[in-house]
Image: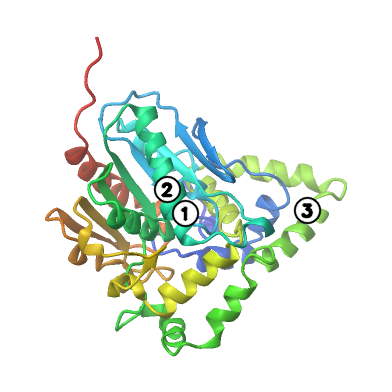
């Protein structure tokens, strides 16, 4: 595919080692923001329908043309930050599209965008109230007994907490994609300075937590997007941008680049209490791996996880360093627990040029061996 893209356009593609910051840097250096912020670009293409909602949370079921062949449905649990369409980015670079083609019944949990009314919403509300109900809805819709939880980044951490608090209840498999578990490892990697500050109980996390939920996320991106749209409104500019965008989407690599460039600045704020819990209990005090995290008086013990576990981590991930994501299989109580290390960054792991061969296909093979066959219907 690279050979089909002119050398001048090589910066306009996702690389295996990409993290959000590297995508964002090239987005503005190459002027890609004019194409994705000035004119609309379609993301999340797979057909889906809403099957359940609670407050701002939405549960979607994707429509498969290949037919369901596996008895255990897959529930994708995304993070509370940014948008979940990175898992269904564009045709050809969509984990959702791939899993559907492999015969899985796929659902996505979208937490929604919190506002001032959600300041009191915390991690306990998501894990103890919303996630259990979403799991039950998936089982009802699929007529299944158990579900596979596939949690990405922060969504993986919350999925692991759920599996620890509800052992053997409705969950058959647990997959973590670039999900932090040990937030203060001895060698924290590229985020070492941040981890050191949080270990010292610095004021930085408290200040960030106070600000979370009070202002739109990614304020610089919001300002740039507004300026770009004003430029696009200039007579004669928008048709040029549209023509250039339409020419680029003929290539899968360029289409994926435009999608990732859209996603990287599409952030949402955290609810205030949830942000404070996340920064204090996880990053600062590292309570989860210590077995000291409690939600409404219930202690989270990872060794109580007794389902099949797969932890997938990128060796060049700057958001969730390898040392944070790798420990889970050694901490759970079940015998079927393993890790998959991929030479990729946080973005490249999911939608990079090698994501299909190095992440999606090994994941599908692992799931197929643990998901059973869909019973034939008369």
Judge the density around disc 3: few (<14), some (14-19), many (≥20) Cα neighbours within 10 Å.
some
Label 2 secondary element:
helix
Give the residue drawn at x 26%, y 42%.
364
> From the viewer's perspective, is 317 left or right of 226?
left
As drawn, the residue found furthest toward the front would be 297
Colour theme: rainbow
Q: Which residue is under mark 2?
A: 131
Where does the image place residue 336, in percent across and percent down from the top left? Answer: 14, 53
Please identify, in this view, whether the residue under mark 3 or under mark 1 is nearer the observer: 1
In this rendering, the answer to whether 193 lies above or below 281 is below
Residue 270 picture location, percent across and down: 57, 62
Residue to which mark 3 is pinned: 229
Q: Earlier in the sequence, mark 3 or mark 1?
A: 1
Mark 1 lies on residue = 126
- Measuring 67% from the left and 45% from the top, which residue is drawn there? 244
Q: Is residue 374 above or below residue 360?
A: above
Q: How crowded is the residue under tag 2: few (<14 C-alpha within 10 Å), some, or many (20+)?
A: many
Is 315 in front, or is 103? 103
């Amino acid at each position: 595919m690279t050979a089909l893209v002119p050398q001048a356009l090589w910066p306009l593609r996702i690389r295996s080692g990409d993290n959000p910051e590297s995508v964002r840097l090239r987005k503005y250096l190459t002027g890609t923001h004019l194409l994705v912020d000035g004119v609309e670009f379609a993301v999340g293409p797979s057909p889906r329908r809403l099957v359940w909602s609670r407050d701002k949370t939405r549960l979607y079921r994707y429509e498969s043309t290949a037919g369901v062949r596996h008895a255990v449905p897959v529930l994708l649990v995304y993070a509370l930050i940014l948008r979940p369409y990175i898992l269904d980015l564009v045709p050809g670079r969509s984990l959702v599209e791939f899993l559907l083609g492999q015969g899985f019944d796929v659902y996505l949990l979208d937490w929604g965008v919190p506002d001032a009314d959600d300041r009191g919403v915390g991690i306990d509300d998501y894990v103890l109230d919303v996630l259990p109900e979403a799991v039950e809805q998936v089982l009802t819709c699929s007529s299944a007994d158990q579900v596979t939880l596939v949690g990405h980044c922060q969504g993986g951490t919350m999925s692991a907490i759920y599996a620890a608090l509800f052992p053997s209840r409705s969950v058959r498999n647990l997959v973590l994609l670039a999900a932090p578990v040990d937030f203060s490892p001895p060698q924290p990697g590229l985020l070492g300075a941040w981890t050191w500050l949080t270990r010292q109980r610095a004021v930085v996390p408290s200040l960030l937590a106070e600000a979370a939920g009070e202002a739109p996320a990614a304020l610089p991106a919001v300002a740039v997007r507004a300026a770009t749209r004003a430029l696009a409104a200039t007579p004669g500019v928008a048709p040029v941008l549209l023509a250039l965008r339409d020419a680029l989407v003929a290539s899968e690599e360029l289409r994926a680049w435009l999608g990732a460039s859209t996603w990287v600045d599409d952030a949402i704020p955290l609810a205030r209490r949830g942000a404070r819990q996340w920064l204090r209990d996880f990053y600062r005090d590292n309570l989860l791996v210590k077995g000291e995290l409690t939600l409404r008086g219930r202690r989270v013990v990872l060794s109580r996880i007794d389902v099949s576990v797969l932890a997938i981590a990128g060796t060049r991930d700057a958001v969730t360093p390898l040392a944070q994501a790798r420990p889970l299989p050694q901490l759970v109580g079940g015998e079927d627990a393993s890790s998959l290390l991929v030479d990729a960054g946080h973005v490249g792991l999911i939608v990079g040029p090698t994501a299909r061969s190095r992440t999606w296909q090994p994941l599908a093979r692992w799931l197929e061996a643990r998901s059973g066959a869909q019973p034939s219907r008369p």
